[in-house]
Image (spheres, coloured by chain):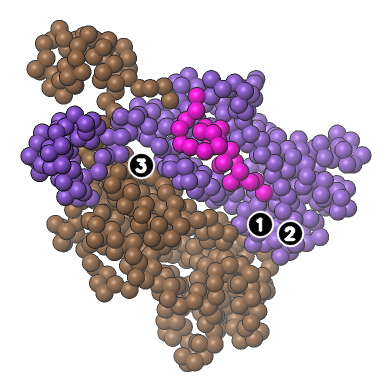
Chain colours: A purple, B brown
Amino acid sequence: MARLPTVTDVGRVAGVSRQTVSNVLNSPTIVKSETREKVQAAIAQLGYRPDASARRLRTRKSSTLGIRLDPMTNGISGSVHDRFLHALTEQADERGLRIMLFTATDPNDEIRQFSRMRDGADVDAFVLTSTFYDDPRTEWLIANDVPFVTFGRPWGIDDMNDPLHLWVDVDGWSGVREATAHLLAEGATRVAFLGWPSHSGTGDDRRRGWRDAMTAGTSLTPAQLDELEMATEDGVSQGRDAIRSLAPGSFDAVVCVSDSLALGAILAAGADIPVIGYDNTPVANAIGLSSVEQPLAEVAAGALELLMGPRGAEILDRTTTPDEPKHRLVKPHLVVRTRQLS
Amino acid sequence: MARLPTVTDVGRVAGVSRQTVSNVLNSPTIVKSETREKVQAAIAQLGYRPDASARRLRTRKSSTLGIRLDPMTNGISGSVHDRFLHALTEQADERGLRIMLFTATDPNDEIRQFSRMRDGADVDAFVLTSTFYDDPRTEWLIANDVPFVTFGRPWGIDDMNDPLHLWVDVDGWSGVREATAHLLAEGATRVAFLGWPSHSGTGDDRRRGWRDAMTAGTSLTPAQLDELEMATEDGVSQGRDAIRSLAPGSFDAVVCVSDSLALGAILAAGADIPVIGYDNTPVANAIGLSSVEQPLAEVAAGALELLMGPRGAEILDRTTTPDEPKHRLVKPHLVVRTRQLS
């Protein structure tokens, strides 16, 4: 980029000192009108503009939010983070905020990035995704008094209302419960659940939604429910293998914790077994898979409102507003479709 | 964020002037050692660090690249831009560069964003995606001497080697030609082409790949090829409708300009018609769709190398290096799979 004109350049053209230019910009009344006019003419001639870096330096505000870009996954649900990033960027833009991306290899590396960006005053706050039990990242941010909001509950902490931990999350329990109840209402009696291994906060929450709906809507015993409950890593082939491991006829519908697993379930279970996924990915839309939609625009709006109020771009000091909500739990909704493939 | 300590704070704690602190930081030899030690103790006590904004102001370098985040599409190929963004962010990170995201409603709005970020010295260069004929964005960037590189050829300009227009692109002609030749080698004789409407530079380029492979590998006349050539907007249902409009038996394989169209083609054409998509999306991997893979990591590496050389984070002045390559055309490759659904 061509070097931008500086205060020094303006002074040179106007034949005055750098300090005089600075006075014209910041305290024009102390400068003689003749001098002021010369400086203003030089500013116009050079197209000089006060610099954003200088403004950032004065205000110590970057008007920028930092967010880690997750590594690309091959799963079809990985796009959820990308869709959240789109929603966040668009809504931040409406507030005059920008989004700074960075990458990190693990939580400790992410903390090193936080530290570097904090030291540089590069961002005003961080937006974190994919929270997990005993998350060291939020501990560090709280200990270092760095504003942040998480997409995801602070799994494992005692007080979900901790005013130091702003969070937005989607009520996965409610979404999976609704999906399961829908299948029962449509005539299913033995809805299998395809989930992730335990100690994923998000996965455990969704599993409870299935279990509560089955307990309320069927007369199956806890032991019978255990037989319908599967846990596997995420992925299409994992979903297929899990369903193949069930005895044919032992289940008549499947609810899955992700669209990737649901696609695998469809490939293994055949055309007459209804399957519901989670995330409402473009793939679900493409193949006619019913799926639970996470309202990501609402999540992004909630994250920005918790940090900065209903509008504006200034980080609020939430410790001084004890009555303001510090989190938001957003309801997902089931999108019902007719399957396009067997 | 807690206010960071400033030079003024350091001076107050050390009992010296702001200028003396500045001298310790920038010209320590001119400061008495006793004073220097007091200032260094205050720096350590307060945890003061020279500010990135101040550094940016001195150097007029932001170490940041700007890129527009495309609006989210419902198509399954939209993720190509997201995958490119991941590759770019990771590789920029390795050079100590960050990525600043913004949104724009149309090309003129994007130009307004360029202008604002240029004026603020917020970014050192821009990375553009989705170039098109008579693109006003690159005209503006060239006219305003703002460094940039495009992912996508400067469609429509006379000189693809214009040193002012750095670009990286994937050789779609080669990719679709390879896919078509593969189907012919496997026994197909009448490969239909499902493309986008004309005057998409990218789409026209891929169409030529199909046509050249069919001309070389079959004895079909131009008029017969015309009957096998379809053009439609992108999308699964559009792909399905296009294939349904062909007479059954008039084609025995399909090459598509996107995985979205390919998924539609699969749903309409039945299990015995081979289909090849383009973009090698996670969906293709999930359902066993053969597809042309764009090597996005190589595209991202090429973009950074054209801007800044093989390593480093300084924008090169390419007008002074006439012998250096100003563009890079990357070869895609066909990923062959066994279909998992009928």
Q: Position of residue B224 (x, y in %)?
A: 52, 90
Which of marks 2 and 1 precedes in the sequence? 1
Element type at marker 1? Answer: helix
- Residue B25 position, x and y percent, is 19, 21
**Which residue is outermost to the front?**
A33
Residue at left 75%, top 53%? A275
Decide if residue A59 is on the left or right side of residue A138: left
- Distance Cα–Cα, label 1 vs label 3: 33 Å
Residue denoted by label 1: A284
On screen, residue A85 versus residue A174, left or right, reads left
- Magenta segment range? A293-317
Kindly identify which numbered label has been placed on residue B98. Answer: 3
Q: Residue at x 29, y 16 (%)?
A: B9
For the C terminus of chain A, which image quadrant?
Answer: bottom right
- Which one is in front, A160 or A199? A160
> Does the stretch in magenta take in A105?
no
Report the amino acid beneath label 3.
Arg
Name the residue carrying label 2: A337
Q: CA distance from mark 1 to mark 2?
A: 9 Å
User: In the image, what residue type sits under mark 1?
Assistant: Ala
- Say which amino acid is labelled 2: Arg
Q: Quadrant of residue B199?
A: bottom left
Numbered label tally: 3
Q: Say which element carries label 3.
A: strand
Q: Please say if B115 is above or below B15.
A: below
Q: Residue at x 21, y 31 (%)?
A: A29
Contact, CB < 8 Å: mark 1 with mark 2? yes
Percent of width and height locating residue B317:
18, 53
Q: Residues within 10 Å of mark 3 (few under 14, many from 20)?
A: many
- Mark pair 2, 3: CA separation: 41 Å
**Do the residues at pointers 1 and 3 share their chain?**
no
